[in-house]
Each structure stands twice: as structure tokens, then as C-alpha cells.
Amino acid sequence: MTTTWIAAHRTAVISPHESFQLIESRAFADQTVRQSLRLAGGGEALRIGISNRFGKEPLEIGGAHLAGAGIDTPLAFGGAAAVTVPAGEELVSDPVEQRVAAGQVLTVSLYLPGDTGPTTFSAVPHDIGRAAPGNQLTSPDLRDAEELTTGHFGLAADVLAPEGTRIAVAFGDSWIEGAATTPGQDNSFPSQLGRRLTRGWIVNQGISGNRLLTDEIGEHLLARLDHDVLAVPGVSHVLVHIGLNDLGMPGYRAHPEPAEGPTASDLTAGLTALAERLHAAGLSVVAATIGPYRGTVHEGYDTEAGQAVRREVNAWLLGDTHPFDGVVDAAAAVADPARPDRIRAEFDSGDGLHVNDAGAGAIADAVDLKLLDL
């Protein structure tokens, strides 16, 4: 059987040097950082990716260790146990020859001997990580550990899977990333949708606060398309939810002053450009309607102008002139029937902007699996 490397886990990352930050990154020095990742698919072997994409200094790794799923082994990079990842670059480990399966959780430990400076990170980790003093790479339990509320170094995993294995990349904002779903339970909308698939799988490239047209939080969606979608091995389909932050973030950042956001034409033009670039690469693209957020607790986010644009863009997505291969009505899946511009109470995480585990499941259940013919 011929095999090839296919992405089985991805973590989209943001720069610690952005001028606007909802959550700040952090640095490490003479510490062991231990984080988990959950495989969306399996294969005959695997390799681990580490990112210093937005670091301003070289990232010195004094050692790395991989555990879980029957694995307990050091990681090597070009045969070396210690390695330095240059600023702005990423590194992939040597293969670990071990069969792994979908749903298995792996733990990656990195010993960081020097001062890392603010690290390339994700604001919403899939699982809770820990940092502990000194080199504790092989310690079953980290001594004097502190919990990490953020994810670091964009941990990725590829698996050696049968040639022809196809996957989808979930691409977009917090509704993709799974903000407000339970950490460690793998209950984001893409994860719950992935458990419905009979072949292939989904990797998550969502960034909470991300926008279609404007940088921060993270590079805007069109700018990160090459790295976060087109460079992902095995991708054949893309599932997109974006637009909430384009509508709400200007007012949130300017509050209590008013702010001007994008028009419906701005957003539909951006979505059309996104679809055209993905189609040019031979990928199928499924878009989701922009979710409801009326009454959110985040001051300045909910405006009449933004709500009007959301209605207009969603009507376009649900019509017959959009450029996508299919559309998921995510908004309808979680909307309050009596007040469709609001999230239903049982699906609301509590802030009026994000869905909880049940809401993410409702969106996953609303997807016609024929749209994801992997």
C-alpha cells in the first residue's frame, strides 16, 4: 500500500506582537512545557510540527518528548535531540514509527533552556497545557507545574496514511476554533462534525477574533489562506465560518465611541475572492452563514449597522448567486426561533456571542455530509 503524509492535527497561531490583543502570550525560560494534541485521523507513523513563525528570536529546544497512544519516546530533528528553530520558521520532527488512530491523545513536552521571548501562540488551547521548572521531559507528572491558559508553538501532527486520503480544513473564527466549548473534550463544531464522517477527517484552523478582511486578531483570513489551508497535506475540502468579528470588532475596539464596519458588499467580495482562490487550487468550499450575536455582553460589538449587514450577507449565502459548493445554515441551527438574531438559551455559552458544546453539536448536525465527500 502506498502511503503519504496527511495532516491529523493543526493549531492556527497568532503573533504575540499584535497591537490589539484579547489575550497575551508569554515567554518561557529553563522550563518544560507539556501540551496535548488529539489526532483527527490515524496512520502508520507520525511526525510533530513546532512553530516559531511569529517569534522574533530563535527558539532553542533542549529536548522534546512524545507520549501517549502507546508511545514514550524522545523526538529527534534531523537526528538531533536538541535543535534551534529560527525566528519566523517552523520545524517538523523525524518520523515516529508507531501506528496511531483517530481520537488518540498525544502529549508533547519541550524543554526550553533559554529565554524564548513572547511565543507564537493560540489564545484558545484545545487542551490545558502545563509549564514546570527545569528539564522534566520524561517525568510522568510535572513537579511544581502551572496551568497554561494559552497554547504555544502551534503544535501540529501529520500521519502516514494511505495515498488518496482526503481531509477538510475548518477555517475561520471562534465558531470554528471552539471558543467557549469545554477544554479537553474535543467538542468544537468541526470536531463534532468530524465524528459524523465515515471517511477522511477534519483539522481545525480557527482563530478566535479572526476577521475576513482585517488583521488582528491573527492575520486576516485571505492573508493566511496559503499557510493555513493550501499548505496542509491532504486537504480537499474547506469549511468556512467568518464575518462575526468583521462586523463586531470595530465597535468593540472603539467603544464607547462609534465605529464604521464593512459593508455587505465588502464581505461578499471578500468571500468571493476566498472561494475563487480555493477553487483555483482544486478545493471544494463550504461556507456557513454568520451566527447570531444580538445582545452579546461584549460592549460595542452589537450594532444596528452590523446586524443589517449580517442579514444581507446571510441572505446572499442562502441564495443562488454565491460562489460556494455548498452552504451550512449555522445561524439557523442555533438561533432562538422567537428572536432569530440571538442564540437560543440552551446553546448560548453565556456571552451571547459564542455557542456551548450543545450549540456546536447543533451546527455539526446541520451539515449535509454530502457536502464533505472526502
Image (cartoon, rainbow, N blue to C red):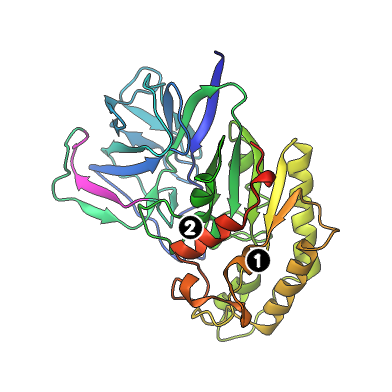
In front of the other: 143 or 114: 143
Residue 335 lies in the magenta stretch? no
Residue 134 lies in the magenta stretch? yes
Q: Percent from the top left, x then y, of residue 95?
A: 41, 21
Q: Is residue 137 above or below residue 246?
A: above
Amino acid carrying mark 1 in the image: Ile
Q: Residue at x 39, y 28 (%)?
A: 100
Boundaries of the magenta span: 127-137
- Label for residue 178? 2
- Label for residue 290? 1
The image quadrant where one finds the N terminus is top right
Q: Percent from the top left, x then y, of residue 150?
A: 37, 55
CA distance for labels 2 and 1? 15 Å
Q: Percent from the top left, x then y, of residue 300?
A: 57, 81
Q: Is residue 269 above or below residue 126?
A: below
Left/right of residue 303 with respect to residue 354 in the rendered view: right
Please say whether residue 293 is visible from this viewpoint: yes
Left/right of residue 185 with respect to residue 362 in the rendered view: left
Q: Residue at x 19, y 50 (%)?
A: 145
Number of residues whose C-alpha sits closer than 10 Å to that of mark 1, classed few (under 14), some (14–19) or many (20 or more): many
Furthest-right residue in this view: 321
Q: Residue at x 78, y 65 (%)?
A: 266
Query: Which of pointers 2 and 1 lies earlier in the amino acid sequence?
Result: 2
Q: Secondary structure at mark 1?
A: loop
The image quadrant where one finds the C terminus is top right
Q: Is residue 147 above or below residue 109?
A: below
Please say whether residue 13 is visible from this viewpoint: no
Furthest-top residue in this view: 1
